[in-house]
Structures are given as C-alpha cells and as structure tokens.
Amino acid sequence: MTYAITQTCCSDATCVAVCPVNCIHPTPQERAFGSTEMLHIDPRTCISCGACADACPVDAIFPADSLPVAQREYAEINAAYYDREPAPDASGAAPEASDTAPQGPNFHTWGEPSFPRVLPADFAPLKVAVVGTGPAGMYAVQDLLLHTSAEVTLIDRLPVAGGLVRYGVAPDHPATKKVGETFARFHTHPRVRMHLGLEVGTDVTPEEIAAHHDAVIYAVGASADRRLSIPGEELPGSISARAFVAWYNAHPDAAPDGIDLSAERVTVVGNGNVALDVARILLADPGTLARTDIADHALRALRESKVREVVLLARRGPEDAAYTRSELLALKHLPDVELTVDDHDPRVAATVDSARATDKAAVLRGVARTRPDWEREPAPGRRIVLRFFCAPVEVLGAGRAEAVRVAADTGERTIPAGLVLRAIGYRGVPVAGLPFDESDGTVPHEGGRVAGQPGTYVVGWIKRGPSGGIGANRTCAAETVSTLLADAVAGALPAPRQGPKAFHRLARRRNRHVIDARGLAAIERAEVTRGLSAGRPRVKLATVAELVSTARAGRGLLSR
C-alpha cells in the first residue's frame, strides 16, 4: 500500500520534511518546486509509513488503495509524475527538474525554509508587528515564534482572523480550510497580542506601528482584481469573481443581497481555479452546500437560483488553461452537472486528442464536445461549458448585463448571460506609507525588505504578486523572516520609541471595537454552536456588527 497526494494539496512541503525515504517531489531544493500544481509521492519508493499524511495540514494524503472513485485518478497522477521526471538516486539526492519546468513571471526558486543561526546575545528580543492574519502573515508568525523569542503584535482590519483561508477558500473545500487550525494555535500564544478590526491608515498610521516595534511585516494580500477594459464592463450584473467569492463566504464587505441569480446562463471570463470555484458553486446541489460553512444568504439565494448553465471563456487553448488538473478533475465528478467543451475551433479537438497522458489538456479527453446554439435558452439540466480560443470584447445590455460579445478566429458571437463574472486575477492595492509598483501591484522589496524603509517587510501576494496557493506562502514567509533576522543580527533595525504595550493603549483609544484573542475565541464558539444546531461545521457571522457584538459578549474587546 502506497500513499497518494490528492486535490487539496497546498504544496507547503511539510510532508517533504517528514518523509524518511525522500519519496515526495518536487522538494523545495528542486527547480520545479513552486511551479508544479501539486506535490507527488513516488509509488516505487514509498514505504507506507503514513508520516506525510499525519503531517499534512489540509488532509490531502491518503492510502492509494482507499481512495474513493472520484479520486482514484490521483494515484495515477502521482505515479505519472515519475514517468516524466527522474527518480532520486540511491543516496536520496533530489532529482534535477526538467528544463521545461513551467516558469511564469512570478516564478521563484525557493529553498527549504531556513534561518540564520541566532543566539540570545545577537540582539534583544524583537517586537514585531504583522499586518494581516491570512496564510502569508501566519506563516511569518509561526517562524518568528518557533525560531526566535520575538513578541508579535497581530493586526487585521477585519474583526476576525483568517484572511483568504476564511474568505477565499470555497466552502465545499473543507479540507483546505483545515490549515486554519494550524494557524489558530498561534492566536493564543503567550508572545502574541491580537488587534482585530484595526485598520492601518485609518485607525493607526504605519509610522505609529513602526514607532512601537522593531520591525513591521505587511501581509495584506491582493484585495483588488484585474479589469477587462472593455465597453460595458461597469454595467450592473458585470462583477468580479472576487466579489462573488466574498459574497458566498460571508465577507463583511459583501452585501447579502448583492448577487442576482435570476438568469439561466452565467458567463465567467477566465479559466483559473477561481473561475472553476465560481462555476461549481453556482451549479452545485444546495443540499450539499447546506452541509458546509457557506454564507446563509448565499445558500438561500442558491436554493432559489435560476442558473442552469455556466460558460467559461478562455483566450487561449486547453493546454494553456490556468486551472490545475486537480480542480478540473473535481469538476468532471460534480454530481448531476454535465461538463462540456465548445468545439467551435478545430484547435480544441486537435489539442485534446494529441495531448500526452500527463498534459493538462488530456483531462478533457472523454468530455463531451458540443456546438451550442447561443441564440437559444440553455437546454434542460445543469452544465458547465468550456469555451477556448475566444475573447470578450463587450458586455451588452440596457441598464444591466444581458450578454457578452466575444471574438474568435471563427467569428464573433453574442452569448446571452444575465450575470458576467470576470475571473482574470487579483491585484494588490497601495499600502499606506509604503512604496508601490503600479505595473504589477506589489511593494518593491529585496528578499522581503521594503526598499528604502529599514525595519519594514512584506510577505505573500503584496510581495510577489497574486501567484501560488496557500503553501507557497510558507517558503515566501521564510525568506522574509530570514531577511528580518539577518537585519537584526547586523544591527540594521531602527530602535522603536515605545513598546507594544503603549501601542495596545493607542489602539484602544483609536478604536473601541478592536478585538483580542478572547473575542476571536468567542466568535469561534458562537459560529460552531450555530453550526451544530444546523448540522454544519459552522454558521458564519456575516457583518462587522455581528462579529463585534459576539466578541463583546465574550468580553474580548481590548481592555485599557
């Protein structure tokens, strides 16, 4: 019996570190690490010890012979990786990655997380503020707490922690959300002080945070989205997938009644994992979603939804699709939803039919090919249509979105759709007091150190751009923390004028609704209790007022 890594792999390489026989690749020392969609277990060398499964933070690793029908292909995917990549040699040395390993504009060759050797005499205990409680920020906090004696001040503009783990992961991916449990153990660490609901630039300035800490790490993510820049994009009913994801995940910024699902057809521009998430949630059985932590208002709307067809538009072909093989495989097994490919362009069939077994396009082999008549209403049933080699050129409608005009080599078409979602990528926004590169939506840095601002650092998407999943933040955070510690050893950190206790008092004066770890625990208890009565893992509190009042009831507002 060997083990296999499945769909929810986060690629943070925790499993690599515990494997006694070096059978999980690519490792952080290999060029392909960070560019492959997931990690893979070599069935030829796996000794079935289960150490990787025990260590996996997202429950992605299982015995291959116990995989359910919908996941059995992952045993083949794991094995196929080693058919095209050389195996480790007898000494256990890592294989060299193929010269054709994918490398995008944000590709970075990460090493295994490591830190400069720090002795107590090298510098006084650090006082570090971390702005952002998503995966990037919490990996940085983990490294600081486990490798140094630093005291950490956690800051987030929202009155609850979690970032994209709470508000970005689809509700029907509960295993992926489990990484939040790993981070949550640091919320109550004795060297952590939490300030939730405190907004940098409004309640406190970056200068004030820096004045109370030796260093500040910004892990604020990418909270905007890329634009299509086509006519009609601003029409009501034409929105970002980011806004839709926030809506179904009960983000406080999302209006409960902000999504109209009265049309039978929805068009999604983009074919990344977010686009697939959106399509899946729109057509999934509401009874199944009722067993997740989806927002109550979203569940009600989806129960009454008229949507029966979702069309995903992609500029390029199936070999260049941005989604991962694992997410597309999951879409193929979505109950009572037909997955089809629009074969309007002969290149689609040619690409799929000639694809190697290990190619992404090969996943579409066996998927039905159709030539939809877009002038007609969707046929009975529910379906997802993948339309490659076409680009949106205009959103049409009188007062709201009613259709999308698309261009392709085969000519222009108008696809009626009552909701148009753009899922073409996230984008960072300027951070108060920090330099900003408008070209790629990031903060300029050197190894995480903000250019021209000693003691200020970045991590995550605001550092490297919106690329990589949850696990990519582990090595990204290690680089930033290593840079910070090297600066501390070199005496390059500016001395704070006051300490974290004074910052605590300042935060309380500026915002009387700031929530601490006790308040967060009260929110957690309330949501889980509500979930138990409904047969769900939790029922999320969806507004700032609900979150703050629940924390107050638990006496978790910052005291003077």
Image: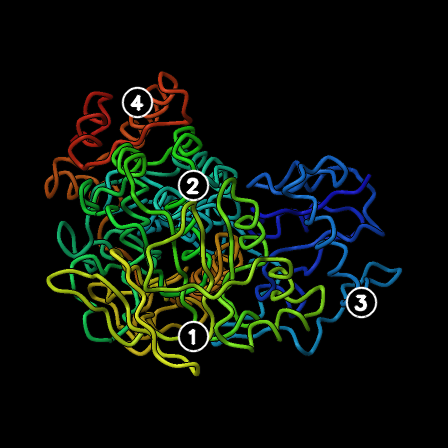
The residue indicated by pointer 1 is 315
- Considering the image in quadrants, where does the C terminus appear? top left
Q: Which residue is drawn at 30% across and 50% down?
A: 264
The residue indicated by pointer 4 is 526
Q: How far apart are marks 1 and 4 (CA)?
A: 45 Å
Q: Residue 86 carries which label?
A: 3
Q: Distance between the residues labelled 2 and 3?
A: 40 Å
Quadrant housing residue 162: top left
First in sequence: mark 1 or mark 3?
3
What amino acid is labelled 4 in the image?
Ala
- Considering the image in quadrants, where does the N terminus appear? top right
The residue indicated by pointer 2 is 284
Q: How far apart are marks 2 and 1 (CA)?
A: 26 Å
Horizontally, residue 491 falls left or right of residue 250, namely right
Q: How far apart are marks 2 and 4 (CA)?
A: 27 Å
Horizontally, residue 215 falls left or right of residue 77, namely left
Q: How far apart are marks 3 and 4 (CA)?
A: 51 Å
Q: Nearer the viewer, mark 2 or mark 4?
A: 2
The 10 Å Cα crowd at callout 1, few under 14, some 14 to 19, many 20 or more, is: some
Q: Which residue is drawn at 32% across and 64% down?
A: 375
First in sequence: mark 3 or mark 4?
3
User: Would you place residue 345 above or below residue 474 in this image?
Assistant: below
Rendering coords of residue 323 (x, y %): 50, 61
Rendering coords of residue 494 (x, y %): 31, 63
Q: Which of marks 1 and 4 is in front?
A: 1
